[in-house]
Amino acid sequence: MPHGSGGGDLSGYAARMDELERKIIKARYKRIQILKEIRDHIERMEDENEKDVLVYRYIRNMKWEDIAVKMNYRRQHVLRIHGKALINFKM
């Protein structure tokens, strides 16, 4: 009996999926390594408030308003600290 086309060999699809999965894992690993390097540089900074703002914003991905609440500062003050932190941050 004749069979319709298009439903047979999935090996190409499986190989492509494996390749994409490897790329995703590699990208995640690279992201983790970059975040670790950034965190290490932040931890070497002298000012604790500057360190906190950078960690909250760039490592924990917090919103400015949430950072202000966490640090018990106004949003504008947090932004000032952030500006100073960027000047003092060395990579």
Image (cartoon, grey):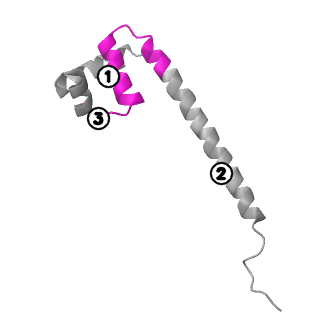
Residue drawn at point x = 22 percent, y = 33 percent: 65
Query: Could you say where residue 31 lies in the image, as x and y percent from the top left?
Result: 54, 34
* Disc 3 to disc 1: CB gap under 8 Å: no
Residue at which label 1 appears = 53
Count of marks placed on residues: 3
Q: Which of the 4 image quarters holds residue 67?
A: top left
- Sort mark 3 into few (<14), some (14-19) or many (20+) by Cα contacts within 10 Å: few
| Residue bearing the label numbered 3 | 63
C-alpha gap between disc 2 and disc 3: 32 Å
Q: Which mark is residue 11?
A: none
At numbered mark 2, what does the secondary structure look like: helix, strand or loop? helix
- Residues shaded magenta: 39-64
Tell me if label 2 and label 3 are in contact, CB under 8 Å. Answer: no
Secondary structure category for the residue under label 1: helix
| Upstream in sequence: badge 3 or badge 1 | 1
Residue 17 to residue 61: above or below: below
Q: Residue at x 52, y 24 (%)?
A: 36
Q: What is the crowding at mark 2: few (fewer than 14 residues within 10 Å), some, or many (at least 20)? A: few
Q: CA distance from mark 2 to mark 1?
A: 35 Å
- Label number found at residue 20: 2
Q: Main secondary structure of the magenta part?
A: helix
Query: Where residue 21 sits: x, y (%)?
Result: 65, 49
Q: Secondary structure at mark 3?
A: loop
User: In the figure, is residue 81 to the left or right of 91?
Assistant: left
**Mark 2 or mark 3, earlier in chain:** 2
On the question of residue 91 being in view, the answer is no
User: In whole angstroms, how far apart are the C-alphas of marks 3 and 1?
Assistant: 10 Å
Q: Residues within 10 Å of mark 1 (few under 14, many from 20)?
A: many
Q: Examine the image and state in which quarter residue 78 appears.
A: top left
